[in-house]
C-alpha cells in the first residue's frame, strides 16, 4: 500500500452496508455543499444490489448528482446481466430518479468500437469524481479490471474494453487512470475468502496480478475499506 489504510470491520453485513452508505452520502453532501454538484460511480454485483436501494432512500439533492457505472457487460440495458438495469431498478427510484445517469452501453457492435463514444460521455462529468463505490471479486478484480488483463496497463483514457478470463462476453470498464481521478473510493467486501485475498493484496505486488492493488497502492483518493465476516456468499 502507498500508505496505511484502516480496515473497518463490522459484525454483520447489514452494518457494513450502512457504514458504506454513510460514507458515500458524506462525500456527496460535501461536494454538493462546496460545488453545487456531485458525482457517484457505482459497481454491479450482489453487494451493490443490497446497498443501492438503501442509498436511494437518502435525503440528497439527487437532481444535482451525476451517477455513472464503473463497468458494464456488453449486453442490452434490459438484460438481467446489465449493471445499468441493476442501477435503474435499485438506485434510480423515488427521489434518486432525479439524478443524471451516465451508462456505459451504446448501440455499437462491441465495447472496443464504442470506447471513444463512452469516453466522451465520462469526460463530460467534472473530475475528480467525488466518490466511487467498488466491490471486489474472489480473484481480486475490481470494476472489469481482471488479473492478467491488458486493461490493467491503460493509462491514457478513462475507459477501456475488457473480457473476464473465464468469459467470452465483452465488457467496458473504468481504467486504472480513471480510478486515480477520484476524491474517495469506498471498497466493500464480505466473507473469509475475500478478506484473506485483501490481506494478500495489501502486501507489495503487481496490480496486474491482483487488480484491487490499483486502489490500494495509489496516492490520490481517500480509501475506505469496509468488511464484514461470516461465510462466503
Image (spheres, rainbow, N blue to C red):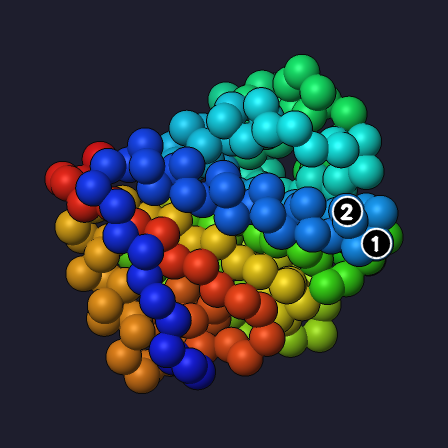
At 58% from the left and 23% from the top, the residue drawn is 57
For the image shown, how many numbered marks are present on the structure? 2
Q: In the depicted view, which residue is nearer to us: 108 or 125?
A: 125
Q: Secondary structure at mark 1?
A: helix
Q: In the depicted view, which residue is nearer to us: 35 or 140?
A: 35
Q: Which residue is mark 2?
A: 32
Q: Quadrant of the C terminus?
A: top left
Q: Quadrant of the N terminus?
A: bottom left
| Horizontal arrangement in the rendering, residue 85 relative to residue 201 (left or right) | right
Q: Is residue 155 above or below residue 41?
A: below
| Horizontal arrangement in the rendering, residue 56 relative to residue 38 (left or right) | left
Tell me how far mark 1 sits from mark 2, CA to CA: 5 Å
Are dots 1 and 2 in contact, CB under 8 Å? Answer: yes
At 81% from the left and 38% from the top, the residue drawn is 64
Q: Residues within 10 Å of mark 1 (few under 14, many from 20)?
A: few
Q: Secondary structure at mark 2?
A: helix
At 59% from the left and 75% from the top, the residue drawn is 220
Q: Position of residue 80 (x, y in %)?
A: 50, 22
Q: Which residue is mark 1?
A: 35
Q: Position of residue 138 (x, y in %)?
A: 27, 51
The image quadrant that residue 2 belongs to is bottom left
At 26% from the left and 46% from the top, the residue drawn is 10
Q: Position of residue 140 (x, y in %)?
A: 33, 59
Q: Is residue 197 above or below residue 22?
A: below
Q: Position of residue 93 (x, y in %)?
A: 64, 18
Amino acid at each position: 500500500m502507498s500508505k496505511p489504510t484502516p480496515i473497518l470491520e463490522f459484525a454483520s453485513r447489514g452494518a457494513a452496508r450502512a457504514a458504506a452508505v454513510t460514507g458515500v452520502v458524506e462525500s456527496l453532501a460535501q461536494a454538493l455543499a462546496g460545488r453545487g454538484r456531485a458525482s457517484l460511480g457505482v459497481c454491479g454485483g450482489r453487494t451493490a444490489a443490497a446497498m443501492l436501494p438503501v442509498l436511494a432512500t437518502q435525503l440528497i439533492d439527487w437532481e444535482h448528482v451525476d451517477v455513472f457505472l464503473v463497468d458494464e457487460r456488453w449486453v442490452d440495458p434490459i438484460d438481467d446481466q446489465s449493471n445499468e438495469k441493476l442501477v435503474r431498478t435499485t438506485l434510480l427510484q423515488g427521489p434518486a430518479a432525479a439524478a443524471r445517469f451516465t451508462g456505459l452501453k451504446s448501440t455499437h457492435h462491441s465495447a472496443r468500437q464504442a470506447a471513444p463514444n463512452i469516453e466522451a460521455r465520462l469526460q463530460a462529468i467534472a473530475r475528480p469524481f467525488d466518490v466511487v463505490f467498488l466491490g471486489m471479486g474472489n480473484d481480486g478484480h475490481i470494476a472489469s479490471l481482471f488479473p492478467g488483463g491488458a486493461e490493467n496497463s491503460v493509462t491514457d483514457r478513462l475507459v477501456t474494453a475488457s473480457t473476464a478470463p473465464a468469459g467470452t462476453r465483452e465488457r467496458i470498464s473504468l481504467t486504472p487512470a480513471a480510478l486515480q481521478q477520484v476524491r474517495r473510493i469506498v471498497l466493500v467486501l464480505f466473507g473469509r475468502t475475500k478478506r484473506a485475498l485483501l490481506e494478500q493484496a495489501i502486501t507489495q505486488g503487481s496490480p496486474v496480478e491482483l487488480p484491487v492493488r490499483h486502489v490500494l497502492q495509489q496516492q490520490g483518493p481517500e480509501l475506505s475499506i469496509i468488511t464484514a465476516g461470516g461465510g462466503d456468499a
